[in-house]
Image (tube, grey):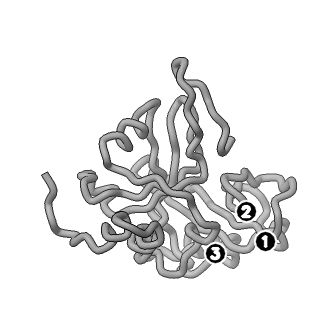
Amino acid sequence: MQGEDQAIGGCAMESMTGRLLVATPTLKDPNFDRTVVLLVAHEPGGALGVVLNRATEVPVVDVLGDWSYLARDPAVLFEGGPVQPDSAICLARMRSPVKRLRGFHQVSGAVGTIDLSADPERMRESIGGIRVFAGYSGWGAGQLEQEIEDGSWFVFDALPGDAFVDRPDDLWPMVLRRQGGMTAAVAHFPPDVALN
């Protein structure tokens, strides 16, 4: 559905599936302070994404042993967001252009979600790496659009490697800097400055 327009209450809305939400310094919610969220679904009924830059210290092998050999460094569980933290969402990056692979749902390009109930051995040749997220970030109908309008989020195109960077703590400033101009300057905003 990426790039397709969808009707919402008579108005057209372009799907943001596969795009990045980058928290602005004005975002007050501590769950999303300096986060980068990949939207894995954006439809008229709402949006769902995972926070890409909140690594935990829990090794993937401790949670999903069979999948751990496909996990990219750091091979740990990530905090995907505050909704249903006991559930898991797995992002995968395919090695080659995506054909039909049972259990893989394309988000953007070679990146998509993968069904963790599938046999990881069957997918070994097709997958270049995975990232596992505990919980997710969710928005009801119109909620995300309002937060963007209020200045809480920047919306940028994602690069294929964004979800799999080796140093996830550096992702927020990295994404901002590559935008150039005044947006790049936001990457240097002090973390402890309160905005009114």
- Foreground mark, 2 or 3? 2
Residue 154's disc is none
**For marks 2 and 3 on the same chain, the one whose residue lies earlier in the sequence:** 3
Q: Is residue 58 above or below residue 47?
A: below
Tell me the residue that label 2 is attached to. 110
Q: Judge by depth and name the residue closer to the eye, 80 or 32.
A: 32
Indicate the amino acid at tag 3. Answer: Ala
Callout 1 crowding tier (Cα within 10 Å): few <14, some 14–19, many ≥20? some
Give the position of the N terminus as an image quadrant.
top right
Q: Give the Cα separation between the discs numbered 1 and 3.
A: 14 Å
**SS class, disc 3:** loop
Quadrant in which residue 32 is drawn: bottom left
**SS class, disc 2:** loop
Residue in the picture at 52% in, 45% down: 48
Give the x, y percent position of residue 122.
85, 66
Residue 95's disc is 1
Indicate the amino acid at tag 2. Answer: Ala
Indicate the amino acid at tag 1. Answer: Arg
Quadrant in which residue 2 is drawn: top right
User: Farthest residue toward the top?
Assistant: 10
Residue in the picture at 44% in, 33% down: 140
Residue 71's disc is 3
Give the x, y percent position of residue 18.
60, 53
Give the x, y percent position of residue 166.
53, 81
Relative horizontal placement of residue 90, taking residue 155 as reference (left or right): right
On the question of residue 34 being in view, the answer is yes
Relative horizontal placement of residue 154, taking residue 90 as reference (left or right): left
Residues tagged 1 and 2 counted as in contact (Cβ below 8 A): yes
